[in-house]
Every structure is written in structure tokens, then in C-alpha cells.
Image (cartoon, rainbow, N blue to C red):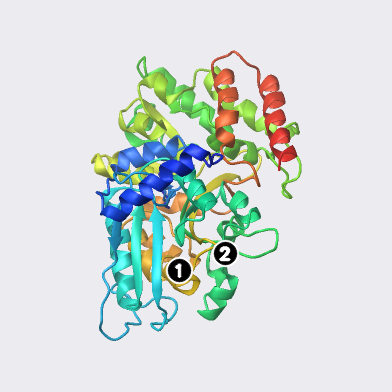
């Protein structure tokens, strides 16, 4: 998460030029290893915040990725198109007898040391801390699977586009990251290998993962095409000092309280700041739309729900925070993303994922902030940004590839990330220990309940790039929410028609 994230670059149509560029990159990559560059935690978070979940770029690709759209939106990988972009690392292997446990503890399944083969894995760069953990995970894998050689390739930019190019040219890595928003396209095009039969062989219970995360990688055939490495729902982050200065003793718990608190903050905060940092981003607005009982696409993915009352009500509330002077866009207060506005003291409240925490920790400011659930509307609603490890359908080493994929998402290896506080666990069994170690992150964990994955079906990759300009117009006062509903409905219907 991966995820991420983070985090949240969308798949684009492959062009002849992209394939030619890829060929050059592969030749350069074969000539030697390149340096793997990684951004800082704040940079990763900002990327996620502008992409999702998301992660989705956030969370890291953690969703951290994840996801990943806006710093959440979590959530990207494959051999890069230039030597400078791709870094190749062979995981250290051992000639000793097969180890059945990772260096960090017993895995949740028993590795099969008889598996052999060469496996390429592509990932997107994250924070230095998470990159180091991935290297540790690969070293642990080498001990458990001494007869499998792993080559890691890092794609430093345009991850989704480059993965799409590699898939189109038949030269994709065996294992790579996929954001939940993009997964339906790859599944329907039969570019990914279903993992069910491989999981059965290793006695891996797919029910050990959160159901909403597994659902994001489940195809129309009912088969699962990826194992989520982590995830990030949204939560409310607030400045303890600024709330206290306004006489607020507890964070708001519902929409009415949010406006009341924001009014108190507005009376105390200086010019050039805002009670709330709010982006014109569908990867944030949708959480409020879900809380109003609305949706963008029907559950079966076949029709638009934009013109229904719940969508309009949620959008009205979200936009009203700006119209009533209670919120400003991050750039209007000199920030790159809402978390940056918090860290600079330019806002008191933001709605982001746990990818904010490493950024605040790096700045030495984590103790200044509190974390709470999203203020509740008519019902509970949230977005969840996730990234999964998947296997290409054309892999020539599928048993070895799944061995790596499943090992990286096992309890023991996922615990390396969660123990470091870098992502939320996608496995339910890790949740209790994670919550005990990081109690301040509990609101994010609780946000998983009732959350919907950042995903809408085939063809919706890059939907934020089509919808966010409409929201920009609403925030600027150039467009009514009624007009926005009409425009967004057309975008959704056109997307569905082109599936």
C-alpha cells in the first residue's frame, strides 16, 4: 500500500512510439543495473494525494500507496523504458537446504522449496523505508525459495503507462503491482492469471484478506486475479493545537458538527489559511457521496447513478464547504496536497489516508495531529485505496511467480510493513496487533467497514482526470452542482457505452 501511496498516472492506450521506446529501455536494462531512486515520504504522499487511493496513488503504491489519484488514491510497476528508470536487483539466493520460515518468523503457509525458476517483479518506488522493506522481503523469499531467482525492476515514473506497454508487447514482468481502479481492464482483457488454483495448492485461504479488497480483484468469472498487499481508507486528520485554540475539545463526528467546528476555526485562523483543506477531487468527494447514499456507478457496473438524489446531496455538501468559506484548495494556501497544508499550519482539518503519518513523522510533527473517522452523513461511507500483487497471464514461470506473489502478501512479510507503520494490513489476522501497536491509526482501520474500493469497472482508469476539472469549476464558482451532475453523468455514461 504500495500502497503507495502514495500514491495515487493511469493506464493509457499503447502507441507505436511507446513500444519502440520500451525496446530501447529493455536493451539498456540488459546492459547493467541502474540506480533505484526513491522519493521522500512527503513526496510519495503528495503523489498519492494527486492520483488514490488512492493510493490512488498513495498509500504507496501503498496505498500506501495506494493508491495510490489523490494521496490515496493508492495507489505502479515494470521494466522502465530507460536504464535510468529501471533498477535490476537479483534477490540473494542460498545454496543451503530449503528454509521453511522467513527471517522474520513463520509464514502463514508452508513454502515449497522444490519450486524453481526465474521471476521478474516490477514495482514503483516508494519511501526509502518501504523500499528497504521490499528488499528485506525479497531476501527472506530467497531463503525460503533458494531455487527461485528474482529480478526486481523499479519503474520510477509513468508506471501504469509502462506496464500497459509491456503487456501489449508481451514483455511484461511475471509479478507486478496493479491499482484497484485499473484491475478490471486487465482482467477483462485476460492479461492477468487467476490465482485460485495456485492458492489452493499452497493452502492459502483468500478469505483471510478483507472482502472488499479481494472483491476489487475478482473478475466477472468469480476468480481472483491479485492479492492486495495493503490498503488505506480515508480518515479525518486534524491539528490538535488549532482545534484547541478555537475552543474545540473533540473532533467533529458528523456533517453538522464539521461545519460548526469549521466556523469556530474560521473565526480564529489568520488570512491565507483555512479550517479545511479540500481538493476538487472525485477521490475525496465520493466518500461524502457514499455517506449521502449516492454512488457514481451501480453495483453491477452497468449504469450511471450520478443523477440520483444521493450523488447530488453528497456533492452539494462537499462543495458547500468551499462556498461557505470553510475550506480552501491546497494550492490556495500554498500547499501541494491537503496533508501538506496541515504540516504547514495552513489548515486545521483534512480528509486523507494513513499515508499522511510517515510524512508527518518524517517532519517530526506527528504528535501535533489527531486522527478520527470521517464525519458521518446519512450513513457510513468511505473509499478504500489498495494495490495488489498480480501475475501476468503469459508468465513462463507461473508456479515460481505465485510463490513470490503469495510470499510477499503472507502474514509474516506483510507484518514487516505494518510493524513499521507504513501501511494498513490487508489481512484481517494482522489487524488486532496493528491496532494495539498504533492506536492512533485505529480510525483508519475502522474506516474499512463500509468502505468501497476505488473502482468502478472496465474503462474507468483515469476517471479522475475527466471528472476533477468539472469539480474545479464548481469550486471556482463557475459551475453549479446541477451542471456538474449533468457533465459527470455524461462522462460516466460515455465510459459505460465504450466498454
At horizontal 55% and vertical 31% (from top left) the residue drawn is 465
Q: Name the residue under label 2.
A: 193
Is residue 8 something one can see in this rendering? no
Vertical side of 300 occupied by 47: above or below: above
- Rendered view: 345 above or below 232: above
Check residue 484 in the rendering and tell me which mark sits there, or answer none: none
Residue at screen point 75% across, 34% down: 308
Coordinates of residue 240 in the picture (x, y in percent): 35, 36
Does the residue at mark 2 contact the one at mark 1 (Cβ under 8 Å)? yes
Q: Mark 1 points at which residue?
A: 401
User: Residue 329 appears at what percent x and percent y?
Assistant: 45, 23
Q: Position of residue 444 (x, y in %)?
A: 46, 50
Between residues 482 and 321, which one lies in front from this camera angle?
A: 482
Provide the secondary structure element on which disc 2 rests: loop
Q: Earlier in the sequence, mark 2 or mark 1?
A: 2
Crowding at mark 2 (Cα within 10 Å: few <14, some 14-19, many 20+) = many
> What is the crowding at mark 1: few (fewer than 14 residues within 10 Å), some, or many (at least 20)?
many
Spatial separation of the CA atoms under disc 2 and disc 1: 10 Å
For the point 35% across and 21% down, which residue is it?
334
In the image, taking residue 49 as reference, residue 39 lies left or right, namely left
Q: Which image quadrant for residue 12?
A: top right
Rendering coords of residue 81 (x, y %) = 38, 44
Q: Quadrant of residue 499?
A: top right
Amino acid at each position: 500500500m504500495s500502497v503507495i501511496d502514495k500514491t495515487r498516472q493511469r493506464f493509457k492506450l499503447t502507441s507505436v512510439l511507446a513500444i519502440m521506446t520500451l525496446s530501447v529501455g529493455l536493451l539498456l536494462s540488459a546492459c547493467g543495473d541502474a540506480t533505484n531512486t526513491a522519493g521522500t515520504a512527503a513526496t510519495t504522499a503528495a503523489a498519492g494525494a494527486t492520483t488514490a487511493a488512492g493510493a490512488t496513488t498513495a498509500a504507496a503504491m501503498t496505498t500506501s500507496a495506494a493508491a495510490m489519484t489523490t494521496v490515496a488514491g493508492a495507489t505502479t510497476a515494470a521494466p522502465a523504458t530507460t536504464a535510468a528508470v529501471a533498477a535490476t536487483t537479483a534477490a540473494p539466493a542460498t545454496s543451503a537446504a530449503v528454509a521453511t520460515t522467513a527471517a522474520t518468523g513463520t509464514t502463514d503457509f508452508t513454502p515449497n522449496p522444490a519450486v524453481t525458476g526465474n521471476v521478474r517483479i516490477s514495482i514503483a518506488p516508494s519511501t526509502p523505508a518501504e523500499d528497504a522493506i521490499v528488499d528485506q522481503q525479497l531476501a527472506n523469499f530467497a531463503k525460503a525459495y533458494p531455487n527461485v531467482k528474482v529480478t526486481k525492476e523499479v519503474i520510477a515514473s509513468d508506471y501504469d503507462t509502462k506496464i500497459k506497454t509491456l503487456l501489449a508487447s508481451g514483455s511484461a514482468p511475471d509479478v507486478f503491482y496493479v491499482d484497484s481502479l485499473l484491475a478490471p481492464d486487465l482482467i477483462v482483457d485476460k492479461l492477468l492469471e487467476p490465482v485460485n488454483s495456485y492458492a489452493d495448492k499452497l493452502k492459502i485461504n483468500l478469505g483471510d484478506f478483507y472482502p472488499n479488497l479481494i472483491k476489487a480483484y475478482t473478475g466477472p468469472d468469480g476468480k481472483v486475479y491479485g492479492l492486495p498487499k495493503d490498503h488505506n481508507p480515508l480518515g479525518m486528520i486534524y491539528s490538535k493545537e488549532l482545534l484547541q485554540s478555537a475552543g474545540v475539545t473533540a473532533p467533529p463526528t458528523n456533517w453538522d458538527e464539521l461545519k460548526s467546528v469549521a466556523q469556530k476555526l474560521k473565526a480564529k485562523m489568520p488570512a491565507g489559511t483555512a479550517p479545511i483543506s479540500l481538493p476538487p477531487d472525485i477521490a475525496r468527494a465520493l466518500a461524502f457521496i457514499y455517506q449521502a447514499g449516492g454512488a457514481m456507478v451501480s453495483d453491477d457496473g452497468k449504469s450511471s447513478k450520478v443523477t440520483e438524489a444521493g450523488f447530488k446531496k453528497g456533492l452539494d455538501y462537499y462543495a458547500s464547504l468551499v462556498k461557505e468559506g470553510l475550506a480552501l484548495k491546497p494550492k490556495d494556501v500554498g500547499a501541494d496536497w491537503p496533508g501538506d497544508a496541515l504540516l504547514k499550519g495552513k489548515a486545521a482539518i483534512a480528509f486523507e489516508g494513513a499515508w499522511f503519518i510517515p510524512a508527518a513523522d518524517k517532519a517530526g510533527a506527528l504528535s501535533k495531529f489527531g486522527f478520527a473517522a470521517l464525519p458521518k452523513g446519512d450513513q457510513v461511507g468511505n473509499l478504500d485505496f489498495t494495490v495488489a500483487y498480480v501475475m501476468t497471464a503469459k508468465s513462463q514461470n507461473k508456479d515460481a511467480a505465485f510463490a513470490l506473489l503469495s510470499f510477499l502478501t503472507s502474514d509474516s512479510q506483510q507484518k514487516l510493513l505494518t510493524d513499521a507503520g507504513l501501511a494498513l494490513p490487508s489481512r484481517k489476522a494482522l489487524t488486532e496487533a496493528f491496532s494495539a501497536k498504533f492506536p492512533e491509526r485505529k480510525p483508519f482501520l475502522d474506516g474499512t467497514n463500509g468502505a468501497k474500493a476505488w473502482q468502478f469497472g472496465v474503462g474507468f482508469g483515469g476517471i479522475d482526470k475527466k471528472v476533477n476539472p468539472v469539480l474545479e469549476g464548481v469550486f471556482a464558482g463557475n459551475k453549479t452542482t446541477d451542471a456538474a451532475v449533468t457533465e459527470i453523468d455524461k462522462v460516466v455514461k460515455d465510459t459505460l457505452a465504450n466498454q
